[in-house]
Every structure is written in structure tokens, then in C-alpha cells.
């Protein structure tokens, strides 16, 4: 069933807008404000870290939409967000501002006792994501660690290294290496 013209609508990633890229979703219609600036605010949107794409379209159709390439909003911390999308129908500029209202990340700490007395100690983590591996500490060999303390084991003193990871979930796998 066709949707009546309503000005401007935002469509994009399903995590934000419900149906992905669905111009008939009237919940994503923008409201006209002063100076031909249109806005849409989505509240309590649960997002993981990542980049999300969107576009603004006129009258629920792709005939006139902005920007030419999809706009993006990058989320650097998982949690609930209030996101305000703005569109100036005179200048054809789009923008989005995401405000974190509740973090869903936790801090996980892994500790390594350097019994082999390595000169440098690195930590590398990975978890199998839905489309790619998530590497919380970067590419191999990972993050170089600083000594955090010492530990005595059977009369011998060893350096202890710790790494804290802030993320939605603990890494599935961790390798300490030199």
C-alpha cells in the first residue's frame, strides 16, 4: 500500500530504523522545524560498536535522497543511545548526533605471569563476530603490556602483566606472546 507524501524520511541500518532501508516506515518520518531543518530522534536504541549507514529521502521515495553516498554514524562504545538526525532541505546537508544513555560494556582483566622471563609481553585477543573476527587489542601480535606487579612462586620472583579490555563481552580467546 503506497504511503502518502510526508516530507522527509530517514532510512538505513536495521539496528536503528527497524526495517532496513524501508522508506514506507513512517516511524522514521522527520519533523519540520525552523529554517527548513528537519529532525528525527530515535531513543533507547541498543547499538554495538560499529558504523551505521543512513540516507534522507523525500516523500517516501528514492527519487530525491541525500547525501549522494550513504551518510554514516560511528558508535565507539556499545550501549543504548538517543540519536538525532537532522536535514537542512535548503542546503541538503545531513547530520546525526548519538548520545550514549547507558553503556553495556564491561571491563575484563587478564593476567599473565612471565615465568619464561620474556623481554616483551604482548596480548592478542579475538572473538568470532557475525561477519568478521573482533580483535579487541588490535592486529597480531596485539598490545604490548607493561609490568603491573611481581609474584613469588617457589622462592622465585616473576613479573606479572595485566591487560584490561572494555567491551560488550569477554574475548573468546587470548594469547600472550613475545
Image: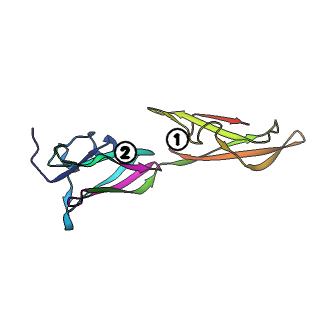
Task: Pick whichever of labels 1 and 2 is earlier in the sequence.
Answer: 2
Q: Nearer the viewer, residue 103 or 59?
A: 59
- Residue hosting label 1: 169
State the image coordinates of residue 46 (x, y, percent, origin top left). Answer: 38, 47
Q: Quadrant of residue 118?
A: top right
Q: Quadrant of residue 31?
A: bottom left
State the image coordinates of residue 169 (x, y, percent, origin top left). Answer: 52, 41
What residue is rendered at 63% in x and 37% in y? 124
State the image coordinates of residue 168 (x, y, percent, origin top left). Answer: 50, 44
The magenta segment is 71-92
Left or right: 26 in relation to 99: left
What residue is rendered at 42% in x and 56% in y? 100
Rendered image: mark on residue 52: 2
What residue is rendered at 57% in x and 38% in y? 171
**Main SS class of the magenta portion in the image:** strand
Left or right: 116 in relation to 43: right
Amino acid at each position: 500500500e503506497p504511503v502518502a507524501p510526508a516530507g522527509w524520511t530517514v532510512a538505513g541500518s536495521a539496528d536503528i530504523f527497524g526495517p532496513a532501508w524501508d522508506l514506507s516506515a513512517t516511524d522514521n518520518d522527520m519533523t519540520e522545524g525552523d529554517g527548513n531543518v528537519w529532525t528525527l530522534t530515535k531513543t533507547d536504541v541498543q547499538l554495538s560498536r560499529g558504523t551505521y549507514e543512513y540516507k534522507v529521502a523525500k516523500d517516501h521515495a528514492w527519487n530525491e535522497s541525500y547525501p549522494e553516498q550513504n551518510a554514516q554514524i560511528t558508535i565507539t562504545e556499545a550501549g543504548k543511545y538517543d540519536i538525532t538526525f537532522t536535514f537542512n532541505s535548503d542546503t541538503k546537508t545531513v547530520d546525526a548526533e548519538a548520545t550514549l544513555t547507558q553503556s553495556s560494556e564491561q571491563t575484563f582483566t587478564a593476567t599473565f605471569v612471565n615465568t619464561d622471563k620474556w623481554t616483551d609481553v604482548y596480548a592478542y585477543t579475538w572473538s568470532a563476530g557475525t561477519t568478521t573476527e573482533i580483535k579487541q587489542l588490535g592486529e597480531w601480535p596485539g598490545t604490548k603490556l607493561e609490568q603491573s606487579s611481581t609474584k613469588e612462586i617457589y622462592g622465585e620472583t616473576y613479573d606479572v602483566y595485566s591487560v584490561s579490555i572494555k567491551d560488550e563481552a569477554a574475548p573468546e580467546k587470548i594469547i600472550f606472546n613475545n
